[in-house]
Image: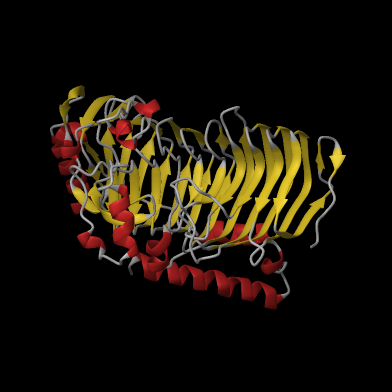
Amino acid sequence: MNVFESLKCNSIFLVITSLFLSCGGKVTDASNSPWERMDLIVKSIPQAKFLENSYNVIDYGAIADGVTINTVAFEKAIKACAENGGGKVIVPTGKFLTGAIHLESNVNLHLEDNAEILFSTNPKDYPIVHTSWEGTELMNYSPLIYAKNKTNVAITGKGTLNGQANSANWWVWSGGKSYGWEKGIPSQNDPANREVLVDMAEKGVPVEERIFGEGRYLRPNFIEFFECNTVLIKDVKVINAPFWILHPMKSNNIIIDSVTVNSHGPNNDGCDPEYSQNVIIKNCIFNTGDDCIAIKSGRDADGRRVALPSKNIIVQNCKMIDGHGGVVIGSEISAGVNNVFVENCIMDSPNLDRAIRIKTNSKRGGVIEDVYVRNLDVGTVKECVLKLNMFYNVYGSQTGNFIPVIRNVILENVKVKEAGKYGVWAEGYKESPVENIVLKNVNIEKADSIYLLKNVKNFNFINTYINGKKVESIKN
């Protein structure tokens, strides 16, 4: 069964389960309780399991001196593990330099406590593969760790994954002056690069003909599971990423547990589930140069071509420090997002712009609905606690004929010390207002303004206080 068949089967399971609960009468109707629905989703997600066999990369020629390139040794160890039914590929104490690592089914890449994998900064160490860049599929540099069409696969252990990105190598490709770029240095912003990729997607050029890589300066993702099923990422620390960090792409049944992400480079999103379903992100720490968690579903025409929404995304017991947003949906969101659950998180930094954010525009489109948030402890955010924006614009003109939908968002039991400019910021279209929003038991101690609301409908404030003042609901 491929991952798309698995996605369909899992969706059918959830629908049948909900119908059973609602008809049986013995259990509370799951359709009336989002948090009961969340519990059903959690119970439906299988756990990755592996044989007890171990394959130490040292035994396959790896040298832990931080200088010798160990790509072949990692490849041999992973191949031996997979050919013998799976198990653990052990990375012991030491510093291991390598190029791209490609995982296989039934393989757990396990880093011992003082192990560190240093990833080469030479683009030639990353072969061209089918991947994605900012929500558009293409043939580009392999992610640093990559798995495609694999089942039952993991990265575990308390070691460190070090992308070694900085302003002298990958980050300078962003074209950002704060990341080392100067006039005359090539970057992703050159006309032959990002713009060409987007144009190819808009024209429907087949993915296999969107060949980038050398000379095109589109940075690789760090860890990407592409069309995979039953994945575990647990305990590892990830630092200095070239680009997006944890990227489940068209994948199903993902558990990301107790991972620490500390990377302040450009586009350094902590975790980007894209076109993915049944994803749990729990007990993690995100300290990032971009969004801590950003749920995606493709950009513009490419997202509408794939037409696979991200759904059943669960975030629990995480800590967000620096970043553009704590939990974000968008902006590459054209296939839509639904059934997002966020609970028991701490978000606090003067360098964290927002707590919860949905960002789209009429070029992206997408239906974003059924987002449930509870029990947040927010210290300081720079701009606002909740931002729902249908006019997101970062790359010049971002308008089109695909009016987005944002509806059914609930925040409850949220405590905030400082919210920055606004407690809440929501902007919709007259023909598509931001609608059915609830803030219940929310207390924002300090904000420059209570809210900025344009084209909203059924915006409910229940026992909610901003600057010590009880906020009244808006029903228009």
Q: Does 439 sit left or right of 52 as displayed?
A: right
Q: Does 406 sit left or right of 322 as displayed?
A: right
Q: Nearer the viewer, residue 331 or 245?
A: 331
Q: Residue at x 81, y 45 (%)?
A: 464
Give residue 58's quadrant in the image.
top left
Q: In x, y percent, where is residue 254?
A: 44, 53
Q: How many numbered markers are drawn?
A: 0
- As drawn, which residue projects farthest toward the bottom? 23
Q: Nearer the viewer, residue 351 or 246?
A: 351
Task: Please say if 447 is above or below 247.
Answer: above
Q: Residue at x 28, y 53 (%)?
A: 196
Look at the image and tell me in which quarter the N terminus lies: bottom left
- As drawn, which residue projects farthest toward the top? 65
Q: Nearer the viewer, residue 381 or 256?
A: 381
Give residue 409's quadrant in the image.
bottom right
Q: Nearer the viewer, residue 152 or 50?
A: 152
Task: Please say if 5 is above or below 228.
Answer: below
